[in-house]
């Protein structure tokens, strides 16, 4: 892989990968580490990846690195999650529904978050998400259903409180 | 087709917003919602439960860190690859068209028969040579003649017009000669070059013994450094 070709891939996909990882780990430094490692692995792969599958390959790698990150125990403590959820309340006070939904990602599991982001942010079809995350299409549908239902319930609960 | 009821209304709402229902199913769902309006809020919330446009932007400096610096321009890179391919093809063609390259070198060395110094030839000249060998070392353009001589035999190069200046500069003679000493004559010229020391025209051996004898005869007795005392001071003189 040529340097110019690699840099083109960085330019095209860095924003999506960065957003995906950041929403997963909610930490700026850790996000940078994972994104950096993801693109380093792309460089090490050389020309062994189909040009049309580079983006999905990047998501797969980023997802696996993120899971490894969680396995190391680098997760937000309950206290930090509570603080983040307080900002959800503030957002709701300001009728910032988008902020509420984005913050409610904290309520989802890693797999539910991944499925939801790949569907809503990137517009991937079920079979593409299944390929990226190495699960079945039925599982994609189930996790997406559960993710949306949790968000819907969260919004509904906030609405009832108000 | 499965019907819509209170237990599975969530799945229907989800599939409606995912775009998984056909026209008939959509119509059935809307009829159900008209019949049970308490689910209208859920219908709206399911539609809201999706991520909007994300405003997270990657930091500019980090974006640049991800990119790799190009050590050479693309133009140089193309030149590099072209050069590499051409070198590769050249080596491949050499390999294909001259597969017996290693065998051809001995063919060059084999005709060098005259380089073997003939004992009889040497004797015929002026000296006496015990034995002569020729040793070819590897494939290097360098050969070595090993000459066994007797104690008083000296091998000298003969100045000839056939010698080039380079050949004359070679250390051909080894002195002093000792009993059965071995003289290594190293030819630094290439294998394809004529071997100058290959015949009696190039090398002659002559007896050193006769030369030494002549030198002894010519030598005069060296005067003593001590003066002889006068007769009266000699110990055996009667007056001492």
Image: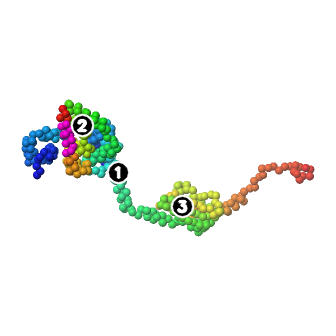
Q: B63 or B7: nearer the eye?
A: B7
Q: Residue furthest top?
A: A94
Which residue matches tag 2?
A103
Q: B128 or A15: nearer the eye?
A: A15
Span highlighted in magenta in the image: A145-157
Q: A73 or A161: nearer the eye?
A: A161
Magenta span includes A152: yes
**Among numbered discs 1 and 3, the one appearing first in the sequence:** 1
Viewer-side label of 1, 2: 2
Q: CA distance from mark 2 to mark 3?
A: 88 Å
Which residue matches tag 1?
B83
Q: Sort mark 1 into few (<14), some (14-19) or many (20+) by Cα contacts within 10 Å.
A: few
Residue B60: give x, y in percent of width and height. Answer: 29, 36
**Are the two marked residues, 1 and 2, in contact with CB atoms closer than 8 angstroms?**
no
Q: CA distance from mark 1 to mark 3?
A: 41 Å
Q: A10 or B143: nearer the eye?
A: A10
Residue B217: give x, y in percent of width and height. Answer: 72, 59
Residue B153: give x, y in percent of width and height. Answer: 63, 63
Residue A133: give x, y in percent of width and height. Answer: 26, 48
Which residue matches tag 3?
B144
Label 3 secondary element: strand
Q: CA distance from mark 1 to mark 2?
A: 56 Å
Asked whether, in this view, residue B198 is left or right of residue A157, the answer is: right
User: Which of the 4 image quarters holds residue B55?
Assistant: top left
Q: Sort mark 2 into few (<14), some (14-19) or many (20+) by Cα contacts within 10 Å.
A: many
Q: Looking at the image, how many numbered discs can be counted on the residues? A: 3
**Same-chain check, marks 1 and 2:** no
């Amino acid at each position: 892989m040529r340097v110019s070709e690699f840099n083109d891939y960085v330019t095209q996909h860095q924003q999506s990968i960065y957003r995906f990882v950041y929403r997963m780990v909610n930490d700026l430094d850790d996000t940078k580490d994972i994104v950096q490692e993801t693109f380093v692995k792309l460089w090490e792969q050389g020309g062994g990846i189909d040009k049309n599958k580079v983006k999905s390959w990047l998501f797969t790698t980023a997802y696996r690195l993120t899971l490894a990150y969680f396995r190391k125990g680098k997760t937000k403590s309950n206290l930090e999650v509570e603080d983040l959820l307080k900002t959800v309340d503030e957002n709701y006070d300001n009728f910032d529904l988008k902020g509420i939904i984005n913050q409610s990602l904290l309520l989802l599991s890693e797999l539910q978050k991944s499925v939801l982001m790949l569907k809503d942010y990137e517009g991937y079809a079920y079979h593409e998400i299944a390929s990226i995350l190495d699960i079945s299409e039925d599982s994609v549908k189930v996790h997406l259903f559960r993710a949306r239902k949790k968000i819907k319930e969260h919004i509904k609960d906030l609405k009832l409180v108000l | 087709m499965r019907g819509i009821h209170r237990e599975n209304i969530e799945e229907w709402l989800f599939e409606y917003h995912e775009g998984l229902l056909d026209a008939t199913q959509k119509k059935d769902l809307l009829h159900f919602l008209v019949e049970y309006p308490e689910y209208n809020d859920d219908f709206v919330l399911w539609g809201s439960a999706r991520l909007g446009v994300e405003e997270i932007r990657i930091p500019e400096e980090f974006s640049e860190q991800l990119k790799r610096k190009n050590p050479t321009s693309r133009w140089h890179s193309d030149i590099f690859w072209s050069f590499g391919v051409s070198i590769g093809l050249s080596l491949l063609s050499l390999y294909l068209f001259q597969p017996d390259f290693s065998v051809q070198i001995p063919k060059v060395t084999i005709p060098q028969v005259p380089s073997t110094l003939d004992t009889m030839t040497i004797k015929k000249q002026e000296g006496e040579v015990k034995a002569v060998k020729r040793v070819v070392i590897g494939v290097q353009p360098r050969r070595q003649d090993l000459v066994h001589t007797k104690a008083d035999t000296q091998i000298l190069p003969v100045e000839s017009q056939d010698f080039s200046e380079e050949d004359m500069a070679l250390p051909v003679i080894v002195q002093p000669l000792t009993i059965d000493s071995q003289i290594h004559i190293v030819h630094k010229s290439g294998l394809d070059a004529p071997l100058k020391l290959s015949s009696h025209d190039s090398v002659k051996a002559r007896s050193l013994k006769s030369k030494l004898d002549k030198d002894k005869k010519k030598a005069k007795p060296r005067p003593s450094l001590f003066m002889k005392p006068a007769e009266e001071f000699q110990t055996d003189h009667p007056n001492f």
